[in-house]
Image (cartoon, grey):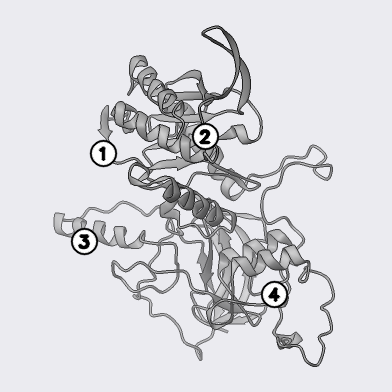
Amino acid sequence: MSESKTFHLPDLGEGLPDATIVEWFVKEGDTIRLDEPLVSMETAKAVVEVPSPVSGKVLKLAGAAGDVIVTGAALAEFEPDPNLPQRAEAQDTGHSHGAAPAKSAAPSTAKAEAAKAERDDAGTVVGAMQVSDTVHAEQAVAVGGVKAMPAVRALAKKLGVDLSRVRASGADGVVTANDVKQAAADGTAKAGTAAPVPSPSAAVPVRDAQQRTALSASGKPMRTQPPGVVASGQPEQLKGVRRNMARVMADAHSKVVPTTLSDDADIHAWQAGNDVTVRLVRAIVRGCQAVPALNAWFDGDKLTRTLHPHVDIGIAVDTDDGLFVPALRNADILDARGVREAVNRLRSQVEDRSIPPSELTGYTISLSNFGMFAGRYATPVVVPPCVAIAAAGRARHQMTPVIGGFESHKVIPLSLTFDHRACTGGEAARFLRAMLDDLALPN
């Protein structure tokens, strides 16, 4: 019997301290080959498949679906099979296992290591990767005869859809996120129900039963859900997006000196067809152009400020899994149609978890439109390194004094939170004034 090998959870390319198990593709006792899908893991930004580092027998798995695994902790144990392909000891896998002991290095060596570190963080694909600056795209992998990307598998779990019964519309028979959504809406592929008996003239062939695989048979929740009756007051471990949101909010609370200004934007002059989100984006752009101090990043440790010539707006998107903030790039050069198309694309990518991690960072200012649910004013949270966030409350009608009497005008309440270390009250007030003036225009 050969010596066993323990596989530790690698850094999945986002620098996060842990990840949540979504689905094991093997069970203890199975034989797996090198680089075949081992498990899909959910981080704060993506769902990725982790391939097997060896060929051999699976001796032990670290947890079940829904369990949180710390980066660098044991994920699986194998008994390598010398008769099957194995990775050479010196072959670069393209990922690390968290913190490593510090080593002294010559300047040239340090430079080379820094370049390698930058390459290692070029994407979220793990396993055997070529050492280069190439961006590696996620690939759809066939599991149980079904081809689908990790994010699509996670979406199917969330919607209770059996992937083996979904009609694939993607290239080479790949099941897409839209396929899963359509199956969920039609109710034709519910997990745990018997498959319908096709007619002899059915156009779509039925897959052999041996090619199918049970999805998440453990019965544990894949993602954090709001507490319900079943919870009975018991503590629930935060996972995935909510876990990262807790860390980000705590960090922001400890680093920012927030101050909030509030006012009402009078939109009585708006003509039919105005899009609220598009107008809010344009108003923020006008504010950034009038007062660049709020379209900036601030480093509280070095006391440095970076003013940005472009406007990338982080659009807060609320989901059952937690808060996502994708970046609307180059909002300052987009027209109304371009803004709407970009916002729709970002929301769709967030919903099916296909949004690249790079699109969830790097914005220069943020927008939260909580008014579509409820609430008039708020104290939105500034997340470093940004220095400002604007939030829109629920629109309402109010009596407004005009020459000769009063009129009922529709208004949108606005709240602007800014980091008072990087901006003055006057700058914030002028920024808000620019937003109010732009929103008052008919178009």
Residue indicated by mark 2: 271
User: Alpha carbon of mark 3 to alpha carbon of mark 1: how far?
Assistant: 32 Å
User: Alpha carbon of mark 2 to alpha carbon of mark 1: how far?
Assistant: 31 Å
Q: Can residue 227 be seen in this view?
A: yes
* Residue 370 point in image, percent of width and height: 59, 33
User: Alpha carbon of mark 1 to alpha carbon of mark 4: how far?
Assistant: 47 Å
Name the front one of labels 3 and 1.
1
Three-letter code, disc 1: Pro
Name the front one of labels 2 and 3.
2
Name the front one of labels 2 and 1.
2
User: Alpha carbon of mark 3 to alpha carbon of mark 4: how far?
Assistant: 47 Å
Q: Is mark 1 on a helix, strand or loop?
A: loop
Three-letter code, disc 4: Val
Residue indicated by mark 1: 309
**Are there few (<14), some (14-19), or many (20+) residues within 10 Å of tag 1?**
some
Name the front one of labels 2 and 4.
2
Q: What element carries label 3?
A: helix
Query: Which residue sits at x=61%, y=60%?
Result: 21
Q: What element carries label 4?
A: loop
Residue indicated by mark 4: 166
**Are there few (<14), some (14-19), or many (20+) residues within 10 Å of tag 4?**
many
Q: Do the residues labelled 1 and 4 touch (CB within 8 Å)?
A: no
Three-letter code, disc 2: Gln
Q: Residue 30 carries which label?
A: none
- Mark 1 or mark 4, earlier in chain: 4
Three-letter code, disc 3: Ala
- Mark 2 or mark 1, earlier in chain: 2
Q: Residue 112 carries which label?
A: 3
- Mark 2 or mark 3, earlier in chain: 3
The C terminus - image quarter: top left
User: Alpha carbon of mark 2 to alpha carbon of mark 3: how far?
Assistant: 59 Å
User: Alpha carbon of mark 2 to alpha carbon of mark 4: how far?
Assistant: 44 Å
